[in-house]
Image (cartoon, helix red, strand yellow):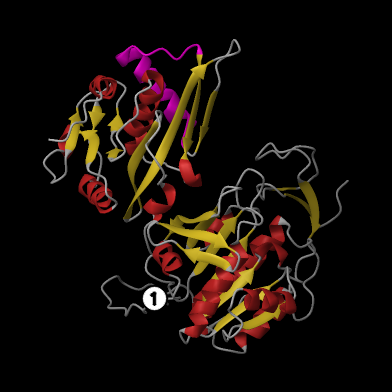
Amino acid sequence: MARDGALYTCQSCGAVQSRWAGQCAACLSWNTLVEEVSGPRPPGALTPSKSAKARAGLVFETLDVDTPTPPRLVTGIDEFDRVCGGGVVPASAILVGGDPGVGKSTLLLQVVAAASLRGLNCAYVSGEEAVEQIRARAQRMGLGHAPVKLAAETGLREIMEGLKRDRFDLVIIDSIQTMWSDQLEAGPGSVTQVRAAAGELVRFAKKRGVAVVLVGHVTKDGQIAGPRVVEHMVDAVLSFEGERGYPFRILRAAKNRFGATDEIGVFEMGEVGLREVKNPSALFLNEGGERAAGAAVFAGIEGSRPVLVEVQALVAPSAYGTPRRAVVGWDGGRLAMVLAVLEARCGLGFGDRDIYLNVAGGLRITEPAADLAAAAALISSVVGEALPQDCVVFGEISLAGDVRPVGRMEGRLREAAKLGFGRALAPTAAAGLGFPVFGVGRLADALQRIKDGDFAAG
């Protein structure tokens, strides 16, 4: 029989049950229910403030009131500010997640150091490192002179009391999974503790007008650990991504109440920290020699900036009964659709061939405009004809085999011209934009043009 006050919380989804079971009824995860006893609140524990307005009841306001918008806090790290929407909004809460060792702490230490050098009052609170370790890392990165206030603490009550003693502009909490509230008996890192700590810090940010950045750990499937309610609490969720073996790191917004959610910031990891990459296209392109068969340069759009990246394909005879399909940096379902269209509309057979598709540089492409670039790389690999070195490709493919126009075609072509490209294989609608475009209305036209090598200028 369960003890009085005992509840069982799923450490995977946060669902609460009155009795223990081997499997969570909400998310169907096994062995994730942990007992959490709700006991009396200790003396001096954190409690929600009761203001006079709260005691008076709910007060309604109207929309037709001119409310001054506070200026954004520009940290000085342009790529970070870009993803946030032009700077950090005061009284906002931001959650930054990423794989272990990808550089979350390094990025935020550089952000808080740059912001403090611009006159902002900044604090960095770590629950994972000692102050001496943070200071040594900052000195190794050349940031030892930045007037950042450091603290190493996991107790939420102590952290809140320390933050309330000063007027901060920007506060970093590294990480939310290490914070511990003494009003709960659950251990640090549990769903209950993460939810309570995040809620208290978000309330502090809104009440005091402080921008708070929370670092979150991720699970093995790439999701931020803890209850999903934390992502709903905060104003922005940023994901810091990077493939092992590549020095490139990409900061991407998954949620942003104050800006676009498709912006990215590109960094390069070096010996002294992260370096901002102002021109990602030059970073993701292969500069050396002629382009091999099976490669196509895709002119994509990431947020507000055009990015050129190389899409590589290899089609080889299958050595086993079941052909292999391997894709890195693109959606596997999208690849299956393009292969089906190539077979049904263009007469190419892939049933007895292995297919390998890779986006160079570790970038992940999500927009449908990459369909034609992937198809061109596959066709180039099959027929053994390389695309011209100065040709970019973009366009969406329909199930009927049509090549459809995509958004911001002029910006894609402008970026290609800036990097020295002189022609494009694109939808017919892209012709007449002041750039040599070989327009194709159907995928079969692109197949024929690549087969014939019909890319003569003019």
Q: How many labels sit on residues?
A: 1
CA neighbours of label 1 inside 10 A, class few (<14), some (14 to 19), many (20+):
some
Q: Secondary structure at mark 1?
A: loop
Q: As drawn, which residue projects farthest toward the right? A: 1
Q: Which residue is mark 1?
A: 72
| Residue at 40% across, 19% down | 382
Q: Quadrant of residue 349?
A: top left
Of residue 133 and residue 269, the one placed in the foreground of this image is 269
Judge whether 409 appears above or below 224 on screen: above
Residue bounds of the magenta highlight: 330-352
Judge whether 283 appears above or below 79 on screen: above
Of residue 30 and residue 364, the one placed in the foreground of this image is 364
**Quadrant housing the C terminus:** top left
Relative placement, left or right, of 307 versus 316 is: left
Q: As drawn, which residue projects farthest toward the front? A: 289
Is residue 406 shown to the viewer in this render? yes
Relative placement, left or right, of 412 versus 191 is: left
Q: Quadrant of residue 427?
A: top left
Of residue 157 and residue 259, the one placed in the foreground of this image is 259
Point out residue 213 in the picture as x, y percentages from the top left corner. Answer: 55, 69
Relative placement, left or right, of 279 versus 177 is: left
Point out residue 307 in the picture as x, y percentages from the top left corner. Answer: 35, 50
Kind of residue at disc 1: Arg
Residue 342 covered by magenta stretch: yes
Point out residue 30 in the picture as x, y percentages from the top left corner. Answer: 75, 38
Residue 444 covered by magenta stretch: no
Of residue 314 and residue 324, the one placed in the foreground of this image is 314
Relative placement, left or right, of 183 versus 123 is: right
